[in-house]
Each structure stands twice: as C-alpha cells, then as structure tokens.
Amino acid sequence: MSLNAYLTLAALVFAIGLFGVLTRRNAIGILLGIELMLNAVNINLVAFARFHGDLRGLVFTLFTIAITVAEVAVGLAIVIVIFRVRRTVEADRLDLLRG
C-alpha cells in the first residue's frame, strides 16, 4: 500500500471519531470517539515511520498507546463515579463540576 492509502485511512478514522465526539450525548460514546481519533494519529505515526525507515515513529506510537490506555482507565472511572452519583452518563446533564 502507498502512503496516501494509509493517510486516507487515518483521515477517515479521524473523521468518524470526530463525528462521534460531536454528535454523541453519551459520555462513553464520546470516549470511544476520542479513542478513534487517537488511533488515527497512531496510524499516521506508523505509516510515516514505515515509509521513512525510521523507528522513532513506532516508539512514539507505543508511548501514545500507553497514554491512551491510561486515559481510558481514568475516563471510564470518572464515568462510573458520575453514573453512581447522577444515574446518567448523558453529557448534557453532567454539570457536577459547576460552581
């Protein structure tokens, strides 16, 4: 596959994730959209690393995946706590941190 094919795939995955973030009301759906966007970035990093013959992009991708796993764990923990308090995970109703 050519570099353009990988970049097109990454752009499509990023657009789907952005659409999910902007249109979902459910906090879990928003987190899934963010994950898709981060995976699109990882596709770009791996594609550029492969076509430039450099391993730095792959190493950076591994760090990005590790950070993404931590972000998912913290995000889901926050969603679970909010669900226990409010009995909903709709983003429109989450005003828990407002003064």
Image: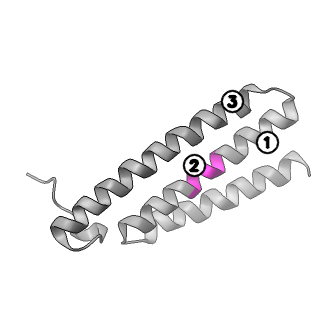
Please tell me which residue lies in front, 15 or 49: 49
Amino acid found under the numbered disc labelled 2: Leu
Rendered position, 3 above or below 87 = above
The magenta stretch is 36-41
Give the quadrant of residue 17: bottom right
Amino acid found under the numbered disc labelled 1: Ala
Please tell me which residue lies in front, 68 or 93: 68
Amino acid found under the numbered disc labelled 3: Val
Q: Residue 96: horizontal and vertical position, in percent? A: 15, 58
Would you say residue 37 sits in the magenta stretch?
yes
Q: Residue 78: horizontal and vertical position, in percent? A: 29, 55
Q: Which mark is residue 38?
A: 2
Residue pictured at 66% horizontal, 60% vertical: 13
As drawn, which residue projects farthest toward the right? 1
Q: Helix, strand, or loop for circle 3?
A: helix
Q: Earlier in the sequence, mark 3 or mark 2?
A: 2
Q: Which mark is residue 24?
A: none
| In front: label 3 or label 2 | 3
Q: Which of marks 2 and 1 is nearer the N terminus?
A: 2
- Crowding at dot 3, Cα within 10 Å, few <14 / some 14-19 / many 20+, comes out as some
Q: What separation in Å lies between label 3 and label 1 (alpha carbons)?
A: 13 Å
Q: Which mark is residue 47?
A: 1
> Would residue 99 appear left or right of 10 to someone viewing this image?
left
